[in-house]
Amino acid sequence: MTIKISIECDGLDCFNSMDIDECDTPEVSIRFSKWEQDPSEDSFHYCPNCWPKVKREIDKRDSD
């Protein structure tokens, strides 16, 4: 039996995904693949293309 784990980007209109190696935990795979986890919501993950935009929105929201 093979188990496949993948993460899909939560960015608006983004369809990027990443497969998780069964030997790694999702956190390890995310960290080494340059994907980012939303600091305020553990279930949201963003690909390297979407993260800069999301980070700017988070920073702007936090500064208001």
Image (spheres, helix red, strand yellow):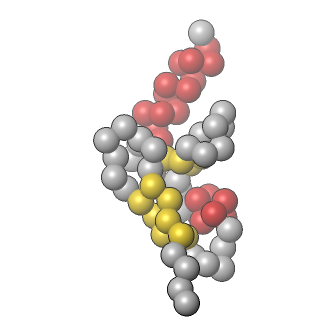
- Pick the residue in front: 28 or 11: 11
Residue at 50% x, 59% y: name it: 7
User: Quadrant of the image for the N terminus?
Assistant: bottom right
Above or below, 17 relative to 49? below
- Pick the residue in front: 26 or 49: 26
Q: Residue furthest front?
A: 1
Q: Residue furthest bottom?
A: 1
Residue at 57% x, 24% y: name it: 59
- State how many labels appear: 0
Q: Is residue 21 visible?
A: yes
Residue at 49% x, 27% y: name it: 56
| Residue 27 image position (x, y, % from top left) | 66, 59
| Residue 31 image position (x, y, % from top left) | 62, 58
* Horizontal arrangement in the rendering, residue 38 relative to residue 4 (left or right): right
* Horizontal arrangement in the rendering, residue 47 relative to residue 60 (left or right): left
Q: Residue furthest top?
A: 64
| Residue 38 image position (x, y, % from top left) | 60, 40
| Residue 47 image position (x, y, % from top left) | 45, 51
* Horizontal arrangement in the rendering, residue 31 relative to residue 34 (left or right): right
Above or below, 3 relative to 33? below
Residue at 49% x, 25% y: name it: 57
User: Quadrant of the image for the C terminus?
Assistant: top right
Q: Is residue 48 visible?
A: no
